[in-house]
Image: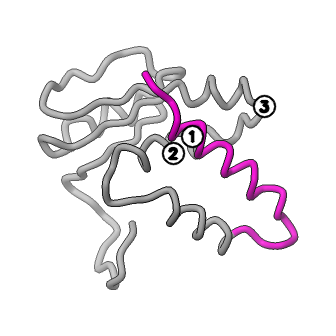
C-alpha cells in the first residue's frame, strides 16, 4: 500500500489491481477486482485465462523469465515491473528510490538484480 497518509486497514475488499502468481489466488480473487481494474497473471504458473471481460488482463511469464535470467526468486519483481508500466499511480523512478532505501549497503549486490528483474517486467510485451 502506498500512501502519504496513515492507512487505517490494509484489508482491501474491492481491489483495483490483482497480481495472481498461483491458480488458487486467481480463482479466489478474480471476481473481487472492480470493473475497469487490472489483473496481472504469472502465465508460467497459471494456464487458465481470466474469465472476465470488464477488466484489463496482462499475462506475464514471470517465473519463466526469472528462470531464464537465473534470478529464480524474483518473479514477483518481474510482475512488479509490469504493474509499474501499466498502473499510472506508480513510477519506475519511485521504485528505484525506494529500493535504494531498503537494500542495505551490506547487500548492495541485490540492488542491481532487483532493478534488472523490474526492468524485465517493465519491458515485457505480450
Residue 109, quarter of the rendered image: bottom right
In the image, residue 50 lies at what x, y percent?
A: 27, 23
Q: Mark 1 and mark 3: span between their CA atoms?
A: 13 Å
Answer with mark 1 or mark 3, whichever residue precedes in sequence. Answer: 3
Q: How many numbered badges does the structure rendering display?
A: 3
CB within 8 Å, label 2 to label 1: yes
Q: Which residues are magenta?
A: 103-126
Q: Secondary structure at mark 1?
A: helix
Answer with mark 2 or mark 3, whichever residue precedes in sequence. Answer: 3
Direction top: furthest residue: 47
Q: Which mark is residue 78?
A: 1
**Is residue 38 located in the magenta-colored stretch of the structure?**
no
Residue ID at (44%, 59%): 91
Nearer to the camera, 94 or 15: 94
Q: Mark 2 and mark 3: span between their CA atoms?
A: 17 Å
Answer above or below: position of 53 versus 101.
above
Kindly identify which residue carries mark 3.
70
Graded by Cα atoms within 10 Å as few (under 14), some (14 to 19) or many (20 or more), the crowding at tag 3 reads few
Amino acid at each position: 500500500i502506498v500512501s502519504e497518509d496513515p492507512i487505517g486497514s490494509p484489508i482491501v475488499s474491492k481491489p483495483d489491481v490483482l497480481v495472481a502468481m498461483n491458480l488458487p489466488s486467481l480463482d479466489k480473487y478474480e471476481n473481487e477486482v472492480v470493473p475497469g481494474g487490472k489483473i496481472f497473471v504469472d502465465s508460467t504458473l497459471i494456464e487458465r485465462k481470466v474469465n472476465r471481460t470488464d477488466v484489463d488482463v496482462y499475462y506475464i511469464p514471470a517465473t519463466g523469465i526469472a528462470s531464464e535470467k537465473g534470478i529464480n526468486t524474483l518473479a514477483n519483481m518481474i510482475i512488479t515491473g509490469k504493474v509499474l508500466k501499466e498502473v499510472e499511480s506508480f513510477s519506475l523512478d519511485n521504485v528505484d528510490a525506494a529500493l535504494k532505501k531498503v537494500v542495505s549497503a551490506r547487500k548492495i549486490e541485490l540492488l542491481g538484480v532487483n532493478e534488472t528483474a523490474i526492468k524485465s517486467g517493465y519491458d515485457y510485451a505480450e
